[in-house]
Image (cartoon, rainbow, N blue to C red):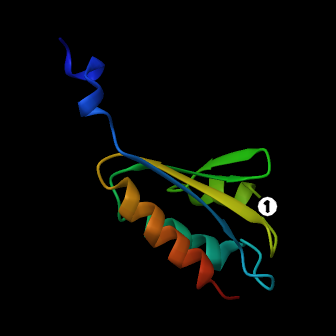
Amino acid sequence: MPASSDPTMATPTAERTVQLPADVDLHARPAAHFVRTAMGFRARIVVTAGERDADAKSLLSVLALGAKGGTALRLRADGDDAPGAVDALAGCVSGLSD
């Protein structure tokens, strides 16, 4: 049986919804901090704002979300370090400032 069809070998995933601080838009400086945090993990990470998805490791993709203060962001990571990635990014978002 190939490893990919073995349910015990499933890739770890993690997901959480967080809210941008009310006074912080996800513009260049906060987005760069977010992306630097994401790049510290091997997991594939996607951030969603409304109906738009972005690669959390791409500054241009994150900026294109156009997320304003108070926006809900859904963080999803797939990979061995997915839970740690989501935890770190949730902490990053809550600590963002202009």
**Residue 22 visible:** yes
Q: Can you give x and y, in whole percent of width and height, for residue 98 in the image? A: 70, 88
Q: Quadrant of residue 16?
A: bottom right
Quick one: which residue is furthest to the left in this view? 1
Q: Quadrant of residue 31?
A: bottom right
**Residue 33 visible:** no
Q: Residue 38 versus residue 60: which sits nearer the camera?
A: 38
Quick one: which residue is furthest to the top in this view? 1
Residue shown at 79% from the left, 51% from the top: 50
Q: Amino acid at mark 1?
A: Gly
The crowd level at tag 1 (other Cα within 10 Å; few <14, some 14-19, many 20+) is: some
Q: Residue 31 versus residue 71: which sits nearer the camera?
A: 71
Q: Can you give x and y, in whole percent of width and height, for residue 97 in the image? A: 66, 88
Q: Is residue 96 above or below residue 8?
A: below
Q: Can you give x and y, in whole percent of width and height, for residue 14 in the image? A: 46, 52
Residue shown at 29% from the left, 49% from the top: 80
> Is the N terminus in the top left, top right, bottom left or bottom right quadrant?
top left
Which residue is under mark 1?
A: 66
Residue shown at 25% from the left, 22% from the top: 6
Q: Can you give x and y, in whole percent of width and height, for residue 41 in the image? A: 35, 59
Q: Total of numbered circles in the picture? A: 1
Residue shown at 79% from the left, 67% from the top: 71
Q: Is residue 39 above or below residue 78?
A: below
Q: Secondary structure at mark 1?
A: loop
Left or right: residue 50 compared with residue 9: right
Quick one: which residue is furthest to the front in this view? 8
